[in-house]
Structures are given as structure tokens and as C-alpha cells.
Image (tube, grey):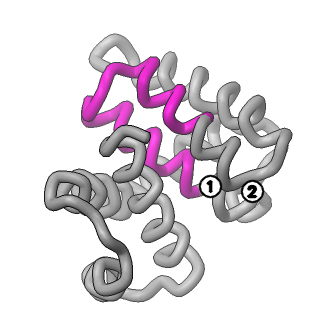
């Protein structure tokens, strides 16, 4: 497993906790790193992804609601909602090429979500990529 993939897993875990508890992101992050072991570069990238995805969550959520026909955000599984937040943040801010971001999001879905999730998330992320325009 690549260090960047592990960073994304860590970021997703922190996002999930933030989504469920709505505790302060700094508190979640501090507590998470007390238990998780990772190289400094992995921690740094995971923290960047987590902080960015939290900061952009409202914008990402609005985009997902716009793109997901007949689905309210609160009806999505929490893990799927947070995979979308993480991937949309990455698409917006160019942490990796768009195809890599989408592939990594689908790998997270395969590992942490249901069997149906990758296809659903792929559709939303493909539409998000088109919606975000050529700068992504």
C-alpha cells in the first residue's frame, strides 16, 4: 500500500469521526494520532486532507446534493458521504491527477463500504469532475 493511500485511509477515518461526533477537527486529529502509527510524511498528507475536506465540507455537500438525483446527503451512508468529501476536496485542490483521486476513492469504497458503493460513488465523482471544470 502506498503512503498516499494510507494517508487517505487515515483522513477518511478522521472525517468519519468528525461527521459522527462533530467535535472540533483539531481535537479529533490529536486523539487520532495518539493511537495511529505513521511516518511523518503520511501524517502530514493525511492531516492536510482531513483539514481541507472539513474546511470544504459545506461546498462539497452542496455539490453532492446537486449531483445525486433523488438522494439527500443525510441518506447517504456516512462512509460514502465522507469518501465523497475527501475526493471532491482533492479534485478541487489538485493533490493528485483527477483519475488517481477517483481511483483512490473507489478503492476506499471497496475497503470500507458496501459492494454497491463504488459504482454509485464513481457516478457522482465523474459528474463532480465535469462540474468542477477544466481547472481540475
Q: Is residue 43 left or right of residue 61?
A: left
- Report which residue position mark 1 lands on: 81
**Quadrant showing the N terminus:** top left
- Percent coordinates x, y for residue 127 in the rendering: 60, 23
Residue drawn at 66 percent across, 44 percent down? 109
Tell me: residue 71, above or below residue 104: below
Residue drawn at 35 percent across, 52 percent down? 7
- Report which residue position mark 2 lands on: 76
Tell me: residue 94, above or below residue 126: below
Residue drawn at 50 percent across, 34 percent down? 104
In contact (CB < 8 Å): disc 2 and disc 1: yes
Within 10 Å of disc 1 (Cα), the crowding (few <14, some 14-19, many 20+) is many
Prevailing secondary structure of the magenta residues: helix
Within 10 Å of disc 2 (Cα), the crowding (few <14, some 14-19, many 20+) is few
Q: Nearer the viewer, residue 103 or 74?
A: 103
Q: Nearer the viewer, residue 22 or 42?
A: 42
Residue drawn at 36 percent across, 75 percent down? 36
- Percent coordinates x, y for residue 125 in the rendering: 58, 30
Q: Is residue 26 left or right of residue 88?
A: left
- Percent coordinates x, y for residue 80 in the rendering: 66, 52
Highlighted range, magenta? 82-106
Amino acid at each position: 500500500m502506498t503512503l498516499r493511500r494510507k494517508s487517505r485511509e487515515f483522513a477518511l477515518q478522521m472525517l468519519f469521526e468528525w461527521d459522527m461526533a462533530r467535535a472540533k477537527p483539531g481535537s479529533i486529529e490529536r486523539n487520532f494520532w495518539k493511537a495511529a502509527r505513521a511516518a511523518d510524511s503520511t501524517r502530514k498528507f493525511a492531516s492536510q486532507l482531513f483539514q481541507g475536506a472539513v474546511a470544504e465540507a459545506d461546498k462539497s455537500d452542496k455539490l453532492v446534493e446537486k449531483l445525486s438525483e433523488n438522494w439527500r446527503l443525510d441518506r447517504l451512508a456516512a462512509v460514502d458521504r465522507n469518501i465523497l468529501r475527501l475526493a471532491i476536496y482533492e479534485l478541487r485542490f489538485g493533490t493528485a491527477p483527477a483519475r488517481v483521486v477517483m481511483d483512490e476513492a473507489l478503492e476506499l469504497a471497496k475497503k470500507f463500504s458496501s459492494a454497491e458503493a463504488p459504482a454509485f460513488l464513481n457516478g457522482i465523482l465523474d459528474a463532480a469532475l465535469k462540474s468542477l471544470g477544466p481547472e481540475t
